[in-house]
């Protein structure tokens, strides 16, 4: 039986014990597919309603049907996390970019400075928008959305770019506030 890491954050919030059967099943699937329970899930395991809300939003944004590929969504996660200097998300989602792209250099460039990454013009426009949202969302104008349309994104795609960037801005702040630690397994993945 898989147990969440009670030391995933600097806060003393032990996981519910025992976990509800549906949560335990979800964690067992994580171990089966990922080889671990991501510490972000372990961190939320003290409150199953919060965990369920977090995973529902994450799964919808990152895994559901979208005009954005899974890689593009992970790229947004990494670039937003880079601007916010979120240790947890840079490590975890940097590993996902390396895995999905098959390109360790891309993952590293996105963590350090996406402007040096080998990107298509469409990817650069997407990441430029995500960065502007992160640094100065009140300054987003029609011209910013038009630049995404000109790059080939639909209005639905623009919604998805904004939703993923928004989610990671929230989760970055939470992870930093509670000193969430990435699973050590992430560091060696897809290198």
Image: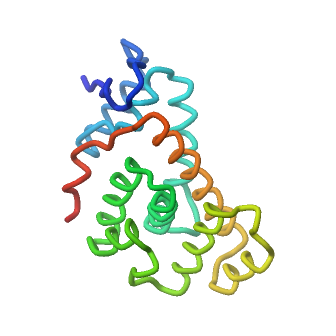
Where does the image place residue 28, in percent across and percent down from the top left?
30, 32
Q: Is residue 169 above or below residue 30?
A: below
Tell me if 171 is positioned left or right of 141 in this view.
Answer: left
Q: Is residue 10 above or below residue 60?
A: above
Tell me if 189 is positioned left or right of 85 in this view.
Answer: left
Which residue is at the front of the view, 149 or 29? 149
Q: Residue at x 44, y 83 (%)?
A: 119
Q: Which image quarter is the N terminus in?
A: top left
Where does the image place residue 74, in percent across and percent down from the top left?
45, 61
Tell me if 153 is positioned left or right of 10 in this view.
Answer: right
Tell me if 111 is positioned left or right of 51 in this view.
Answer: left
Which residue is at the front of the view, 132 or 75? 132
Q: Residue at x 59, y 79 (%)?
A: 125
Q: Is residue 90 above or below residue 171?
A: below
The quarter of the displayed image where residue 117 is located: bottom left
- The colour scheme of the drawn protein is rainbow
Where does the image place residue 111, in percent across and percent down from the top left?
38, 65
Which residue is at the front of the view, 10 or 191? 10
Where does the image place residue 168, in percent across and percent down from the top left?
54, 52
Can you name the residue that lies furthest to the right here? 142
Q: Is residue 143 above or below residue 175?
A: below
Q: Residue at x 30, y 66 (%)?
A: 98
Can you name the residue that lies furthest to the top here? 17
The quarter of the displayed image where residue 100 is located: bottom left
Q: Residue at x 41, y 15 (%)?
A: 16
Q: How many marks?
A: 0
Q: Which image quarter is the C terminus in?
A: bottom left
């Amino acid at each position: 039986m898989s147990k969440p890491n009670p030391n995933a954050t600097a806060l003393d919030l032990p996981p519910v014990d025992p976990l509800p059967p549906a949560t335990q099943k979800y964690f067992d699937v994580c171990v089966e597919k990922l080889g671990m329970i991501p510490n972000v899930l372990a961190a939320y395991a003290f409150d199953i309603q919060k965990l369920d809300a977090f995973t529902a939003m994450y799964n919808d944004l990152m895994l559901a049907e979208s005009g954005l590929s899974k890689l593009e969504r992970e790229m947004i996660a990494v670039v937003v996390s880079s601007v916010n200097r979120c240790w947890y998300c840079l490590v975890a989602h940097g590993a996902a970019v390396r895995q999905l792209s098959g390109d360790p250099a891309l993952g590293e460039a996105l963590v350090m400075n996406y402007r040096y990454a080998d990107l298509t013009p469409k990817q650069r426009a997407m990441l430029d928008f995500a960065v502007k949202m992160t640094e100065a969302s009140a300054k987003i104008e029609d011209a910013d959305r038009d630049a995404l349309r000109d790059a080939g994104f639909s209005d639905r795609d623009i919604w998805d770019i904004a939703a993923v960037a928004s989610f990671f801005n929230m989760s970055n702040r939470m992870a930093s506030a509670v000193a969430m630690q990435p699973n050590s397994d992430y560091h060696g993945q897809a290198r």
